[in-house]
Amino acid sequence: MSAICLALTATAFAIWWLKSLDGLPDIGEPFDVEAFRAFRIADKQNAFTFLRRADQKLTPGPFSSPAVPWSQADPKLREWVEAKRQALEVFQRAALPRQS
């Protein structure tokens, strides 16, 4: 008797599961990974290009508390920022949204 109940339960579950899949859209063929990898972004529009360039130009510097206003920042920090201005500008270019 329990075998019949188990078989009926399994059949009911299988029917419910298959019916729950009704109405799902056909997604077609599997995703083509190679075609996705072939997509390239031009260097002048790729933020990672700018970030790599900026990272190469930066060296660790003297850092102070972020709560200190710029006018009261350590002079060594201000000199470091001025010396690394070009790298910081490249970081900013990478962070700005691109115009199409």
Image (cartoon, grey):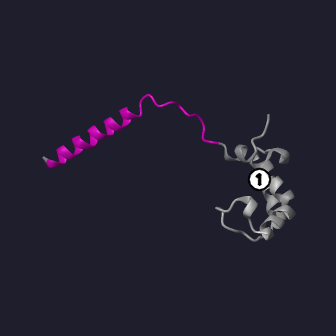
Tell me what residue is drawn at x 81 percent, y 63 percent.
81
Residue 4 sits inside the magenta stretch: yes
x and y percentages locating residue 98 in the rendered image: 78, 40
Question: On the image, which quarter does residue 64 sit in?
Answer: bottom right
User: Range of the magenta residues?
Assistant: 2-31
At x 75%, y 71%, the residue is 62
Relative depth, front residue between 92 and 52: 92
Q: Quadrant of residue 21?
A: top left
Instruction: Name the secondary structure under disc 1.
Output: helix
Determine whether, in the image, residue 48 is placed left or right of residue 44.
Answer: left
Q: Is residue 57 magenta?
A: no
Which residue does the numbered mark 1 point to in the structure image? 48
Please determine whether, in this image, residue 62 is positioned above or below residue 67: below
Question: Residue 55 versus residue 6: which sits nearer the camera?
Answer: 55
| Residue that lies at the very extreme toward the left in this rendered image | 1
Q: Is residue 97 left or right of residue 84?
A: left
Q: Nearer the viewer, residue 51 or 15?
A: 51
Main secondary structure found in the magenta portion? helix
Horizontal side of 5 relative to 66 (left or right) equals: left
Q: Looking at the picture, which amino acid does disc 1 mark? A: Phe
Say left or right for 84 vs 62: right
